[in-house]
Amino acid sequence: MKILAADIGFGYTKATDGKQSQIFKSIVGDANEAQFGDSLLPGQPQFPRHIGLGGQSFFVGELAEQQSRSRGFTLDQNQFLTQYAKTLALAALVPMVDSGDPVRLVTGLPISFFRKYKDALTTLLQNRHSVTLFKPGSLERDEKIIHIERVRVVPQPFGTMFNLLLNEVGKPTSQRFIHEKIGIIDIGFRTADYTVSDKTRYSERGSQSSDNGISTAYAAIAQVLQEKSGVNVELYRLYDGVSKGTIKIKGKRYDLTGIVQSAFQQLASRIAQEVNRLWADDWDIDAIIISGGGGALLEPYLSPLIEGEVLPQPADQDARLNNVHGYWKYGQHLWGA
Ligand SMILES: Nc1ncnc2c1ncn2[C@@H]1O[C@H](COP(=O)(O)OP(=O)(O)OP(=O)(O)O)[C@@H](O)[C@H]1O
Ligand SMILES: [Mg+2]
C-alpha cells in the first residue's frame, strides 16, 4: 500500500510519494487536442499535463498557462475546491500510482477553511477515480484507476512542522517539536497562514489565515513596472525577475532591486504586525518557523520583525515543498509499516 501526499496551493500544486516529487502551477484549462506539442529543446515534460476526467479533458500547470484558451484560476476557496482541487490533485498523483492499487493520501487545507471543508475534501478524493493520460505529441492514451482508499486532511502549515519533526519512516527525531510550543508562518502565493503547534496539538486560538501572500508584494512591484513600462506584467510571471533583481520588457531592462526591497519590506511588516498581535497571549512560544515559497523570499525581511526565536529553514530545499514532504512523513507515521 503506497502512501502519497498532495499540497494543493493557490499558486502551485505539489505532490510526492516519498521518492519523487512534482510541482506545477495550480492552473486548469481546456485541452485543445490538435496542438503542435513538440519542442526544439530536449526533455519532454517528465509528468503528464494533459488528462481526462469524467468525460472532459484538461491541461494543467504551465501547459494550461501557455496553451489553453480558457484557463481556470480562482482565489475563491469554495470554487477552488469544487472545480479545480480534484483535477489538480489527480493530475499530480497519477504518475505515482499503479492502476487500481489502493493508496492512502495526506493532504491539507488553509487554516481558515480547515474545519468547514475537511470532510468535503475527504469525500471528494476518497474514491476510485478513472483518469485518462494523453501522451504529448501523439494520439496514444492510457487509462489509469487511482484508488484512494483513505484520506487524511491536516491544516496546511502542519506539513512544515511534520517535516521537521518526523524522519523518513514517520518516527519523531526532534524532541523539541514534541515537547515545545511552535509557531508556524506559511507564506504562499495568495495566503499567509499562521498556526501554533502546542506539543504537536493544533491550537485554534493561535491559528489564522490572511490575504498577505507574496502576490500582494508582486502586485506592488507590477504597479511600479506598469508606470515605468506601460506593460501590465501578470503576477505569476514575476518570480524570475524578482529573484534576479532585473526584468526585460519589450527589449528594455529594468532594475528591480529597489522596488522589490520596498515591496517585501512592507509586506513583511504587515505580516509581523498580524503575527505579533495574534500570538500576543502565546508569549510562551518556544520557536517560530517561516515556511512556504513566499516565506523563503520574505524571511530576511520578516525574521528581524518577529518577536521570538526564528528557526532557520534548510537553504538547499525548495520551500514550496516543505508542507508536502511533511504530509508524506505524517502518512508514514499513520500508516507506515
Ligand atoms: N523556485 C521557485 N519557483 C517559483 N516560485 C518560487 C520559487 N521559490 C519560491 N517561490 C515563491 O513561492 C511562491 C509560491 O509558494 P507556495 O508554493 O508555498 O504557495 P502556495 O502554497 O501555492 O500558495 P497558498 O499557500 O497561498 O495557497 C511563488 O509565488 C514564488 O513567489
Ligand atoms: Mg501553501
Image (cartoon, rainbow, N blue to C red):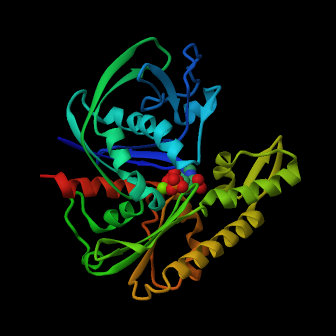
Q: Does residue 169 appear in this view?
A: no
Residue 22: x percent and y percent? 42, 42
176 left or right of 66 in image: left
**131 shown above or below 237:** above
Which residue lies at the image location 51% right of the left edge and 43% below the top edge? 80
Q: Residue at x 48, y 22 (%)?
A: 57
> In front here: 147 or 330?
147
- Position of residue 111 in the picture relative to residue 178 (left or right): right
Going by the image, does 126 lie left or right of 141? Answer: left
Which sits in the foreground, 334 or 229? Answer: 334
Q: Position of residue 250 (x, y in %)?
A: 83, 40
Residue at x 32% of width, y 45% of height: 122
Quadrant of the frame with the N terminus: top left
Decide: is 313 above or below 277: above
Residue 120 is situated, as x and y percent measured from the top left of the image, at 37, 45
Residue 261, compared with residue 17, is above or below; it is below
Which quarter of the picture shows residue 285?
bottom left
Residue at the location (40% across, 39% down)?
89
Picture coordinates of residue 118, whole percent (x, y): 37, 52
Q: Is residue 150 left or right of residue 11?
A: left
